[in-house]
Image: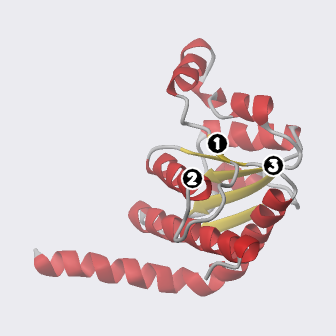
Amino acid sequence: MTERIYSLFQQSVEAKMHVGEQLAPLIEQAGNILVDTLLNEGKVLICGNGTSAALAQIFSSALIDRYEQERPSLPAIWLGSNVATYTAISADTQHANVYAKPIRALGTPNDTLVAISTSGNSANLLQAVRAAHERNLRVVALTGRDGGDIAKHLNEHDIEIRVELPSRGRIHEVHLLIVFCLCNHIDFNLFGLE
């Protein structure tokens, strides 16, 4: 069993090394969009499902509280945080609108939506991207495999960071590293933090 566990560590490292060079410029571009959003008094709206929802929560927490070092709080909203609203929308309309409705209510053209999805095919995330475009928000999409439907609905102002790996576990691991890279980029560019 120890060998199996060590093998998983190796697979994780190899997956990150496999996609790292390809993704670095896209992560930098996405980081620049987020820095620009924050410098222009915009908010970062973040959503995802399942494990991706947990990554969205980690990202918003790191922006609101801190990443590695103390610094001023940054405006970020994890769109799944209000359980009462989330369940009301799911019960009364459709689950596909759980992120789109808050974006339509809260989103402004200075804001950026970060949508996280391993498949890129979740209806509620696709609706979120559409709602973001209706409100003139830019979109940073963290996707996996072939990018799914989300990739097809991005425009020239958006950035897709696609982790082209077959394993959901490895995609989630790389998405977490991307979130941390974005946090580092933001902290360095806004506050000079190393």
Q: Is residue 129 above or below residue 152?
A: above
Residue type at mark 1: give it.
Answer: Leu
**Mark seen at residue 117:** 2
- Mark 3–mark 2 Cα distance, whole angstroms, equals 20 Å
Q: Is residue 171 above or below residue 108?
A: below
- Mark 1–mark 3 Cα distance, whole angstroms, equals 17 Å
User: Can you say which quadrant of the picture contains the N terminus?
Assistant: bottom left
Name the N-terminal-most of marks 1 and 3: 3
Q: Mark 1: few, some, or many residues within 10 Å (few <14, many ≥20)?
A: many
Residue at the outermost top position = 92
In percent of the image, x 51 and y 84: which residue is there? 18
Q: Is residue 18 above or below residue 71?
A: below
Residue 168 horizontal/vertical position (percent): 43, 60
**Mark seen at residue 111:** 3
Residue 45 horizontal/vertical position (percent): 69, 46
**Callout 1: SS:** helix
Q: How has the structure been colored for display?
A: secondary structure
**Callout 2: SS:** loop
Residue type at mark 2: give it.
Answer: Ser
Q: Mark 2: few, some, or many residues within 10 Å (few <14, many ≥20)?
A: many
Q: Which residue is mark 1?
A: 125
Camera-nearest label, 1 or 3:
3
**Mark seen at residue 21:** none
Name the N-terminal-most of marks 3 and 2: 3
Residue type at mark 3: give it.
Answer: Asp
Name the N-terminal-most of marks 2 and 1: 2
User: Can you say which quadrant of the picture contains the C terminus?
Assistant: bottom right
**Callout 3: SS:** loop
Q: Mark 3: few, some, or many residues within 10 Å (few <14, many ≥20)?
A: many
In percent of the image, x 87 and y 56: which residue is there? 40
Q: Is residue 34 above or below residue 53?
A: below
Residue 123 horizontal/vertical position (percent): 62, 37
